[in-house]
Structures are given as structure tokens and as C-alpha cells.
Image: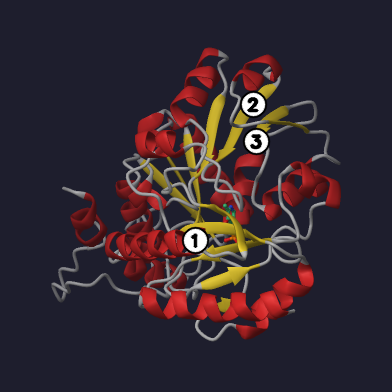
Amino acid sequence: MRFETKAIRLAHTPDPTTNAVISALHLSTTYQFDEVGKNTGYDYGRSINPTRIAMERVLAGLEDGEHCISFSSGMAATDALLSVLVPGDEVVSARNLYGGTIRLFESIYIPRGVKFIYVDGTAPDDFAKVITPRTRMVWLETPTNPQLQIFDIALFSDLAKAKGTSLIVDNTFASPYCQQPLALGADVVLHSTTKYIAGHHDVIGGALITSNAWWNEKMRFFQNTAGAVPGPFDCYQTIRGLKTLAIRMRAHEANAVALARHLEKHPFVKEVLFPGLANHPQHELAKKQMTGFGGMLSFNIRAGSNAVNALAKALRVFHFAESLGGTESLICHPTTMSHAVMTEEDRQRAGITEAMIRVSVGIEHPDDLIEDIDRALAAAQKA
Ligand SMILES: *Cc1c(COP(=O)(O)O)cnc(C)c1O
């Protein structure tokens, strides 16, 4: 089956009582035993839930992985991966990560004795040099947030394999429609399903997809043991969202291309960061490893935070809000919002300036988006 078909057909769970076409939303937290030691395989809702299993089946299929283990948020999925670490272990990570991931690394795992080594993802040689026998995982987020840098997953996979360590790829920004890291050699794919996967700004969730038996066993055990499972209704909403992932991603990308081209010509815009533009530093790599450029872009305006505030207040179609990947277009100011937890120095090193604006391009009519951003840029210019 192709992607679009899997997104729809894998969601189906046979129901012999009704032959329902749509999988049921199972809310029961407990299941009856037939006799001592004999049940249907379903016993307790934290351990197993039919709606959750249906969602995990679709997600595994769309990433072409054998297993999916889902969680109550992207951060809970991240925490599950890190839970295998013991004091003295090391994680080598490409710089430029989601702000919450950095906060989890630094405020929870550093005090527990885990070491994080950050390197420039565009210079993979750096990686090879810092990998030691204590390196338990190599961590990659591509495209990055908010600079939209692209890192070479296949190259990192080769390096990680040569050193006997696992490659984790956070695929949230691309979605499985635009990028399939397992096929490029990643061991585990991480998603905040809150974003493109669920796609409508109404679910918080996370998932790990892997074909690696060791990771599957560890993560399945952790899911049940630590218990940060997604609720059945969230799984139901996510299954529904996934059915339109392909058509949504095509619409997100078409709108992002239109907006990026428009912004590039705008006199008040200094620089547009979008992997689909020919002048993006890793455009060729994006074309090679991605099957679409996605719907995220960032740009720098020719002014500081006063102007950003005027821009934010002038928006009528875009929402000035965090998060990404839903039908509604969002504009975010990384310095004061998504990346506020970073120190000023770290932000500078990551290339996040006060004048940077991140856009999650939704699927409204592109002309309405362009008109809205022009009005907001005019207000910013006057500020
Ligand atoms: C949002 C996000 C996360 C965290 O996911 P939550 O669902 O908010 O917990 C992790 N990685 C990336 C790239 C994200 O955008």
C-alpha cells in the first residue's frame, strides 16, 4: 500500500459485531477475565487499549517501521528514550533542538550525571570525533527549529553504526509524509504527534517508531511502567488527523512555497529560511533526503523586538502563538516564546535573533496569508 492508502486503511480495526468501517473509541479502563489466567489479551487500560493500538499501527506503517510506542506528549516520548541512560552515559546531539528538549536534557538529565555534547550538524566530522564508548545515542532534529537547517540523516546513521551507537531522529518538523528517517538508517524516530500528525491543534501526544527489537522492548516496558500513555480520545483524534496527513502536507507545502517566495521579495525582510528555496544552504540535501519541504519557514526582519510586537498585533489571519503543524497558520517569536528557556548566549550561538520570526504555514487560502503578512509587515515597519 502507498502512503495515502496506509493512512486510511491501517486505521481500521475489524469489529465482528457491527462490521464498523471506523475503529471504535474504547474508553474502558479494565477488561473482564473469562476465568483465572484467561482473558482476551486486554486487561488494563494503561497496559493496552484498542484505540491506542490502532493509532500505533498507523504510525508504524507511515514511518515504515515495525513498532510504534505512543506517549501522552512529545516530551514524554523524549523522556522515555532518555530513561535508558545511567550516570556517566553520553549523548551526542546536533545543536539547534526544540527548546523543551534542551530543557529536559539540561535540567533533568545533567543533574542525574548524563553528559550532553553538542556539535554542528552541518559538519558531521565533528560527530565522529566526540563519540566515545559511553555514547549511548546520537540525537538529530532535522529540519531544525527555528533555523530550518537540514542535517544528513544517512551520513549520521553511517557514523553512528560505525561506532556502535543508536541514531535518534526527531521527525516532528517534516512528518513522515516529507521524510522517513528509518529508511535512511535511523534506529528510532521521535514525533510530537501534537504537530503535523494530529494536525489540528487539538491533541497533545508523542510517539516513537522503530524496527529495532531492543528499543521496542525497552520503550514498550517503559510506556507501561512509567505510565505516560495517551488517552483514548487523543488517539481517536490522531487517527482521524492522520487520514488527511498527505493532503494536508501538500497544502502546507504549497502555501509555504508561495509565502516564502513572497517574503523573499519584501524590502523589510532580510532573509527567508525555507528548505524549498534554491538559495537555502542545504537545499540540495533537502531534495535528496526529503520527499517534501514541509510547511515551516522562518524569516528575519530588518528591526528589533518593537517591530515584532507591532507585527504580532497587526495579524488578522495568522495567530500569534506557539506550536506548529496544524491547519491554522501560526506566527511565533522564538526569542520570547519557543526558545525563551535558552540563555541569550546559547540563542546567539544557535543563530536565533530578536528579529527572527517563525511561521507554521497553515492550509488557509495563500492570498489571505500573504495579505495578512503584508499588513503586519507594514505595521512593523512603522513601529
Ligand atoms: C513540540 C515539539 C516537541 C515536544 O512535543 P510536545 O508534544 O509539545 O511535548 C519535541 N520536538 C519538536 C521538534 C517539537 O516541535
Tell me residue 361's x, y (percent). Answer: 46, 67
Q: Is residue 133 visible?
A: no
Q: Is residue 309 visible?
A: yes
Sooner in the amino-acid sequence: mark 3 or mark 1: 3
Q: Is residue 70 above or below residue 84?
A: below
| Residue shown at the point (38%, 71%) measured from the top left | 236
Secondary-structure class at tag 3: loop
| Residue shown at the point (52%, 37%) measured from the top left | 281
Residue 136 is labelled as 2
- Nearer to us: label 3 or label 1: 1
Q: Are marks 2 and 3 in contact (CB under 8 Å)?
A: yes
Q: Is residue 298 above or below residue 68?
A: below
Amino acid type shown at disc 1: Lys
Q: Measure the C-alpha gap from mark 2 to mark 1.
A: 45 Å
Secondary-structure class at tag 2: strand
Secondary-structure class at tag 1: loop
Q: Is mark 3 within 8 Å of ligand 1?
A: no
Split into 4 quadrants, where in the image is the C terminus?
A: bottom right
Q: Nearer the viewer, residue 85 or 26?
A: 85
Q: Is residue 230 above or below residue 366?
A: above
- Which residue position holds label 3? 84
Q: Nearer the viewer, residue 381 or 168?
A: 381
Sooner in the amino-acid sequence: mark 2 or mark 3: 3
| Residue shown at the point (47%, 31%) measured from the top left | 153
Tell me residue 220's x, y (percent). Answer: 50, 45
- Which residue position holds label 1? 265
Amino acid type shown at disc 3: Val
